[in-house]
Image: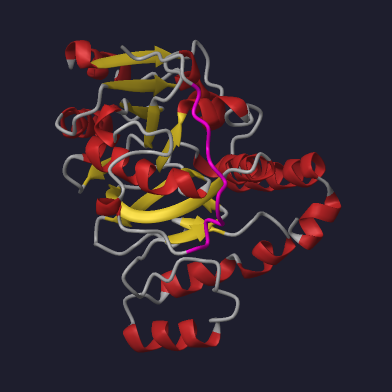
Amino acid sequence: MLCHDVIVAFAHRTSPTAAIPSIDLLPGDVNGKVASERTVVAAVPNYNMAEHLDRLLPQLLRQGYEHIFVLDDASTDGSVEVAAKYGAGVTVVRHATNRGAAANRNQILACVGGETLIHFVDSDMDVHTDEVAETARKLVAQYEMFGVGVIGGLVCRSDGWQEPFNYGPVFGLRSHLTGSLPRLIDWARKRDRLARALATLTARGMREWPQILTEPTATPTYWVHEGNMLVAAETFRVVGGYDPTMREHEVQDLAIRLKRAGVACYFDPSIKLVHHRADVRGRTRPWQSARAALHLVRKHGLRRYLVDR
């Protein structure tokens, strides 16, 4: 059964920046429901990644999800046929025309409800954590009593290095001024002395960005990597999901609306995925990114952009 009538109520008893007990100390969630009873589904956004999808789906089927949904954005490369061959455990939900990543991810809202936990997994990922569904249940049980409604996992590259944007600060002038720093350190990551010198020089500006030269640790943040993200269906539904008009920066927009609704985000590396970085957006991506940034400023106001509020 994928639909539930109970609406998740996130508690706000303390700040998410406070120390959070270990997972083992919290076998159930704030409503008293044991973690093992929570339904977890995988939502796999896909556009023309049939080869990657064929590699990912067998991995997901071993992870204990209640169901796997492939959210297809009008692929033309046989992705639907690939997903179909995996039988009843995989359902394809498909747009008739390509509408972009945000609108594609929102298709999951027609498939689940209530306390169902949605684990978004991009189709060009490999899974490097065992028993992901059970880990997801425990993570949500651990964090939601602290007002945390969205949890981002760890995304690494195939060479083992962390991606530089696993999480980040609020979309605003300050993050635009410091947003090039993670890329700079990432560029120098294989030159140890140079990378560490740059990390020291940029330490102040990097306070809210991932520290890719050190082991990843759980931390409160403003937004998380949408390619490895946990969210309860009702939380996602209440804030309206992603803005379907956006093709870039959609997770930053979602984070602003979550914050206004009193829902916090947290990064936790317990669920690790490896990203193969397939690019299906092509040369238009920089233009789409600039256009989306302007849309965000207009949508949420220039004052908020300038003062990060």
Residue 157: give x, y in percent of width and height: 30, 56
Left/right placement of residue 45 relative to residue 200 reads left
- Can residue 85 be seen at all in this image of the molecule? no
- Residue 198 location (% of width, % of height): 48, 84
In this image, 306 relative to 126: left or right?
right
Magenta segment includes 16: yes
Per the rendered image, the range of residues in magenta is 7-18
Dominant secondary structure of the residues highlighted in magenta in the image: loop
Q: Is 211 on the left or on the right of 287, as rendered?
A: left
Q: Is residue 275 left or right of residue 182?
A: left
Residue at 27% from the left image edge and 27% from the top image edge: 37
Q: Quadrant of the N terminus?
A: top left
User: On screen, 112 above or below 179?
Assistant: above
In this rendering, is residue 102 above or below 265?
Answer: above
Query: At 31% from the left edge and 25% from the top edge, which residue is drawn?
Result: 39
Of the pair 264 and 122, the residue shown nearer to us = 264
